[in-house]
Image (spheres, rainbow, N blue to C red):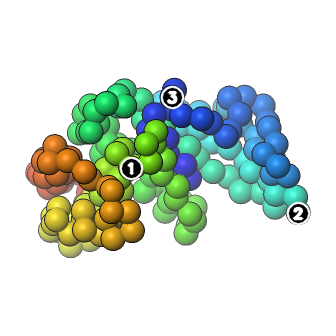
Amino acid sequence: MFFDFFFQSSPTFWPQSGSVHQGNIKIQHLASEAEYFGGVLIRKFSVKNPKGKRRTIKTFHLHGWRREDFVPPQVDTIVQLIAKVEKWTRKCGPAPVIVTCYDGCRASGFYCAASYLAAQIHDTREADVIQAVRTVRLHRPTFIPTVEQYRWLYELSCFLVSEKILK
């Protein structure tokens, strides 16, 4: 799974249609599977290695999050993104998740902390924003660089708890 939060300004490694080769790996765009919801474009691809083994992957592109902003434009967009990714992950089983953005930390770090927080609320019925940020910073110290992102994570946790979105 790949996430690219700044789709129009980031380099792509997948075809817009048809198929491409990246070295000896073939990537085929399955256009009929494309889906768009609330600012997130989902594309489905088939990836084939030289031995002929195929894997289906999805890319999730969050539109409308300007490069200069530290937080996404709307709470419900990130909630929908987290829910779609969780659904895909449950369907496909354990697999790597790759999160990318223009600078490698601002949006990616925010998504990782928000996703961790959502899972924490779902699993324990408790929200600990500090723990969520500490956990993602353990591996990437530059994640969540602003007070604005902390504040937004608190707002997200209140939203998730009050709306009972994650049951």
Q: What residue appears at the point 36 percent right and 44 percent down from the top-left corner?
A: 107
What kind of residue is marked 1? Cys
**Nearest to N terminus: mark 3 or mark 1:** 3
Q: What residue appears at the point 20 percent right and 69 percent down from the top-left corner?
A: 131
Query: Label 3 neighbourhood size at 10 Å, few (<14), some (14-19), many (20+)?
Result: few
Q: Secondary structure at mark 3?
A: helix
| Mark toward the viewer: 2 or 1 | 1
What kind of residue is marked 2? Lys
Where does residue 150 sit, x and y in percent of width and height?
16, 51
The residue pinned by badge 3 equals 9
- From what the image shows, is residue 74 above or below residue 116? above
Circles 3, 2 touching at the beta carbon (< 8 Å): no
What kind of residue is marked 3? Ser
**Quarter location, residue 52:** bottom right
> Disc 2 versus disc 1: distance between alpha carbons?
34 Å
Query: Label 2 neighbourhood size at 10 Å, few (<14), some (14-19), many (20+)?
Result: few
Q: Which mark is residue 51?
A: 2
Circles 2, 1 touching at the beta carbon (< 8 Å): no
**Position of the C terminus by quadrant:** bottom left
> Disc 3 versus disc 2: distance between alpha carbons?
33 Å
The residue pinned by badge 1 equals 105
- From what the image shows, is residue 78 above or below residue 38? below
Q: Secondary structure at mark 2?
A: loop
Query: Label 1 neighbourhood size at 10 Å, few (<14), some (14-19), many (20+)?
Result: some
Q: What residue appears at the point 73 percent right and 47 percent down from the top-left corner?
A: 46
Q: What residue appears at the point 45 percent right and 34 percent down from the top-left corner?
A: 6
Where does residue 118 sit, x and y in percent of width and height?
27, 59
Where does residue 85 sit, x and y in percent of width and height?
45, 52
Let me know if residue 141 appears in the view: yes
In the image shown, does 83 or 114 lie closer to the viewer?
Answer: 114
Q: Secondary structure at mark 1?
A: loop
| Mark toward the viewer: 3 or 2 | 3
